[in-house]
Image: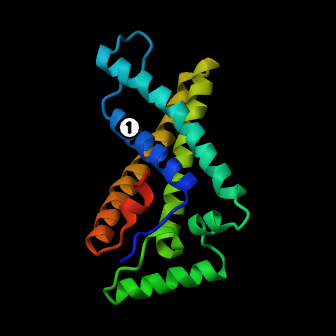
C-alpha cells in the first residue's frame, strides 16, 4: 500500500507531542511531588522538576496544535480530528462495518474512525496539559493543599486515560504497519 502522507506541520507537531507525552507518562511513574515537611529523594525531585518543565513545553505544543488544526483554511485537520458532521459520521460507520467484517480500515489522514480516535486522544492530552498548567498556577499562587490535591486527582485520572490511548495508539499503528499501511513512515518522516 502507498505511504500515508501528512503535511509537514502536522508531522512536526506529532513528533513533539509524542515525545513530550511519552516523557510525561513515564516520568509520572517515578516523580515525587513535594510535600510540606517531607524531603523527597533526589531522583524523585529531579523527575518532578523535569515533569514540570516538559509539561510547560507540552502546553505550548498542545496550543500550537490547536492553532494549527483550527487555522487551516480547508478545515481538513479539524474534520480529521473531529469527524462529527454527517460525512464524518458516515465514514466512521463505514469503518465500523469494515471492522465487523474483519477488515482493517485505512489509517492516516483520511479521517473516519482513526481520525475520531485521534481527536479523542488529543482532547485527553489537551485536558491533561490544561490541568497540569492549572496545577502550576495554583501552586505558585499558594492555593490550599486540598484544592491542589483535587486538581491533581483529576490530572492523574486523565493521565490514566492518556496511558490507555498511548498504548492503544501505538498498538494500532503496529497493526496498520503489519497490514501494509505505511502510517509510521507517513507521520514520522522528517
Image coordinates for residue 149, horizontal then vertical, percent: 50, 30
Image coordinates for residue 163, horizontal then vertical, percent: 37, 50
Give the quarter of the image for residue 167.
bottom left
Image coordinates for residue 184, horizontal then vertical, percent: 37, 60
Label 1: which residue?
23
Q: Seen in the image, is 154 located left or right of residue 68?
A: left
Can you say whether 73 is above or below 46 in the image?
A: below
Give the quarter of the image for residue 182.
bottom left
Residue at (53%, 48%) from the top-left corner? Answer: 13
Pick the residue in front: 32 or 82.
82
Q: Seen in the image, is 33 located left or right of residue 126?
A: left
Can you say whether 75 is above or below 179 in the image?
A: above
Count residues near mark 1 (Cα–Cα under 10 Å), then give few for <14, some for 14-19, many for 20+. some
- How many marks do you count on the picture? 1
Query: Quarter of the image containing the N terminus?
Result: bottom left
Please say whether residue 151 is visible from this viewpoint.
no
Image coordinates for residue 51, horizontal then vertical, percent: 43, 29
Please say whether residue 149 is visible from this viewpoint.
yes
**Image color mode:** rainbow
Residue at (54%, 28%) from the top-left corner? Answer: 148
Pick the residue in front: 146 or 56.
56
Residue at (45%, 47%) from the top-left corner? Answer: 15
SS category of the residue bearing label 1: helix
Amino acid at each position: 500500500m502507498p505511504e500515508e502522507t501528512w503535511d509537514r506541520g502536522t508531522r512536526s507537531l506529532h513528533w513533539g507531542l509524542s515525545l513530550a507525552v511519552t516523557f510525561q507518562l513515564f516520568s509520572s511513574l517515578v516523580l515525587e511531588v513535594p510535600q510540606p515537611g517531607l524531603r523527597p529523594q533526589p531522583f524523585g525531585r529531579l523527575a518532578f522538576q523535569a515533569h514540570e518543565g516538559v509539561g510547560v513545553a507540552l502546553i505550548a505544543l498542545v496550543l500550537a496544535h490547536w492553532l494549527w488544526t483550527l487555522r487551516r483554511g480547508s478545515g481538513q485537520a479539524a474534520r480529521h480530528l473531529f469527524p462529527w458532521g454527517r460525512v464524518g459520521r458516515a465514514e466512521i460507520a463505514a469503518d465500523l462495518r469494515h471492522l465487523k467484517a474483519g477488515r482493517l480500515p485505512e489509517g492516516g489522514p483520511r479521517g473516519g474512525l482513526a481520525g475520531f480516535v485521534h481527536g479523542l486522544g488529543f482532547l485527553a492530552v489537551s485536558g491533561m496539559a490544561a490541568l497540569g498548567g492549572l496545577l502550576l498556577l495554583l501552586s505558585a499562587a499558594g492555593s490550599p493543599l486540598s484544592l491542589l490535591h483535587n486538581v491533581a486527582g483529576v490530572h492523574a485520572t486523565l493521565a490514566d486515560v492518556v496511558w490507555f490511548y498511548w498504548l492503544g495508539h501505538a498498538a494500532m499503528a503496529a497493526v496498520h504497519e503489519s497490514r501494509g499501511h505505511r502510517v509510521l513512515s507517513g507521520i514520522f518522516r522528517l
